[in-house]
Image (tube, grey):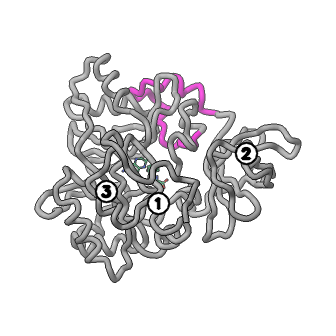
Amino acid sequence: MLDTNTTIVTTPVSVRLRRSPFWPRSHAAGGHNYTSYNHTLIAADFKSPEEDYRHLKSAVQLWDVGCERQIELRGPDAKRLAQAATPRDLDKMADDQCFYIPTVDAKGGMTNDPVLIKVDEDHYWVSIADSDLILFFKGVAAAMRLDVCVDEADVWPLGIQGPKAAELARRVWGDDVMNIRFFRHKRMDVNGVPMLLARSGYSTQGGFELYFEGRVGASALWDQLMAMGSDLDVQAGSPCQSERVESGMLSYLSDITPDMTPFEAGLGKFCEMTRDVGCLGWRALREGQEPMRQIRPIEISGGPLPPMREFWRVVSELGEPVGRISSACRAWSYDCNAAIGLIGRSHWQPGTKCTVETSDGPRSAIVRERFWNR
Ligand code: THG
């Protein structure tokens, strides 16, 4: 059945839309409903959205998330340049750490929400969401006359996600993988080449991301993972909309838009506001620490929702507009509709009732205390 919710590209065309080295295997495994992310193809579905979701929550999946492109910052000023983009304090970053960072412009507006990986001293990767953040880094590096090279690295993340991901990784790389803590990384031997394996990923089901370098050997590695995990029911998958909404994992340009601050996005805990860390937007952010609107989990009543192609308005019980829904989906495990809303201060208290104007008509909804998988 065709899911018209996510169909953008059914047949990958042109070299302008890039493909990761895992694309041939992922596509052969049934990837469809492609969309583009960082000018790179990514499949939204394999079986059906519900089957993919249930499988992710019970087994292990390989995700071609090569579209999470890596901006490489390399040189004596690499850290300074990374810090110019984010209010998160990079002095607190350990040598083997990955940091989820809000990035902002000089006015405090969000430009991306990448994962920053400290590869080495003076060497970072910025694993970006869907915006051309590389231009910010190139511009700032030039304007500040920094001693740093800014390039896109030939590195393509492969996600290994799900409750059985740890067992699969252990079989392939040994017991050492069990010592990698959440958002830390370690070099692992990938058929003779050392590559970074991090305990991270865009789900709350547990798992790893392998930062695969180059293109050679990608299919062989994919086949090896599939063979070694066959009794674990390993299957191809990709970031799961329902699972990530239940978990409150935000998506840049859906839930986070460039007019929002990290505080509005609920990412204030990643902002160091007691001292200026060297972030270009720091002064502007200082004014915005008490936002008038913020991301909230919203439960929308009734049966499955129509596909979302635009923001849905949220209105109060009196009919005044109080916010927007940016992502909504069926949360099958909870037998309800889970959504991410941006809600005004007067109506964001848990338990507040509201109406969501879906494309199929109004539905009653309620502001929740927490996201579902938390
Ligand atoms: N992995 C990597 N790169 C990425 C993503 C990823 N780049 C694009 C996109 N995803 C960036 N967005 C997110 C959003 C949430 C998280 C990671 C990247 C995430 N958050 C954790 C959570 O919410 O539980 C923990 C954050 C923390 O505590 O540090 O994982 O998925 N490589």
| Callout 1 touching callout 3 (CB < 8 Å) | no
The alpha-carbon separation of the residues under discs 1 and 3 comes to: 20 Å
Q: Is mark 3 within 8 Å of ligand 1?
A: no
Question: For the N terminus, which image quadrant?
Answer: bottom right
147 to 53, vertically: above or below: above
- Select label 1 or label 3 by which is in front: 3
Specify start and end residues of the magenta stretch as a single range.
265-290
Local secondary structure at mark 2: loop
Q: Which residue is mark 2?
A: 348
| Between discs 3 and 2, the one toward the N terminus | 3
The alpha-carbon separation of the residues under discs 1 and 2 comes to: 25 Å
Q: Which residue is mark 3?
A: 23
Callout 3 environment at 10 Å: few (<14), some (14 to 19), or many (20+)? many
282 to 246, vertically: above or below: above
Q: Position of residue 70 (x, y in %)?
A: 30, 43
- Select label 1 or label 2 by which is in front: 1
The residue that appears at 20% across and 66% down in the rendered structure is 220
Callout 2 environment at 10 Å: few (<14), some (14 to 19), or many (20+)? many
Report the disc number at residue 120.
none
| Residue at the far right in the pictured view | 318
